[in-house]
Image (spheres, rainbow, N blue to C red):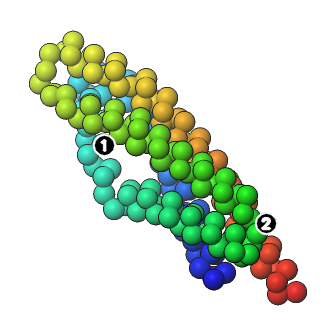
Amino acid sequence: MRTLQTAALITSTTGAALMAGLFCAFAYAVMPGLSRADDRGFVRAMQHINRAIINGWFLTPFLLPLPLLVLATVLAVKGHSPGALPWIIAALVLYGVAFLVTGTQNVPLNDALDKVPLDTAPDLLRDARAAFEDRWVRWNTVRAVLHTGSLGALLWALYLHGTAAGELSS
């Protein structure tokens, strides 16, 4: 069971790292770059990004950590690396909240922007962008911070898990 917990922690850590990196990259590079585009270019680019990102390369590291963190929590409760338990729970909570932020904030904004026809009047493109950009950036920053916090908790949990393995073999 310890090997299963190790695999769950490593896989969850990898997923958290990938998500933290993606959302941080949007926060410090993608969105500041797109902010310089005109309204039509901004809406077009975000529509293309939001359609392209729904693929296995995104969905696997985004979805897989949640059940694996639940598994790692259960295994820690059963006595496998109990010292790591608070950090695994912290990672699960942070990751879960970030997941909820994505589903309740960013995705609905993406869906609304996706419905905006690119051949619409310039003032409607401006209004669509105004309804989207600041809120999406704010919530993206929140989820970037949450995923980064989850990653930090997972890295510490892995350290404690490894330390516990050393104690078992002594």
Q: Quadrant of residue 4?
A: bottom right
Q: Amino acid at mark 1?
A: Ile
Q: Between marks 2 and 1, how big is the CA–CA gap?
A: 41 Å
Q: Quadrant of residue 112?
A: top left
Tell me the SS state at disc 2. Answer: helix
Q: Is residue 170 above or below residue 71?
A: below
Q: Amino acid at mark 2?
A: Gly
Disc marking residue 131: none
Q: Nearer the viewer, residue 120 or 35?
A: 120
First in sequence: mark 2 or mark 1? 1
Q: Is residue 137 above or below residue 122?
A: below
| Residue 79 in view, yes or no | yes
Residue at 23% in and 20% down:
125
In the picture provided, is 58 more to the left or to the right than 161? left
Q: Quadrant of residue 91?
A: bottom right
**Mark 1 packing: few (<14 Cα in 10 Å), some, or many (20+)?**
few
Where residue 23 sits: x, y (%)? 49, 44
| Residue 29 in view, yes or no | no
Of all residues, the one furthest to the top in this rendering is 123
Residue at 14% in and 16% down:
121
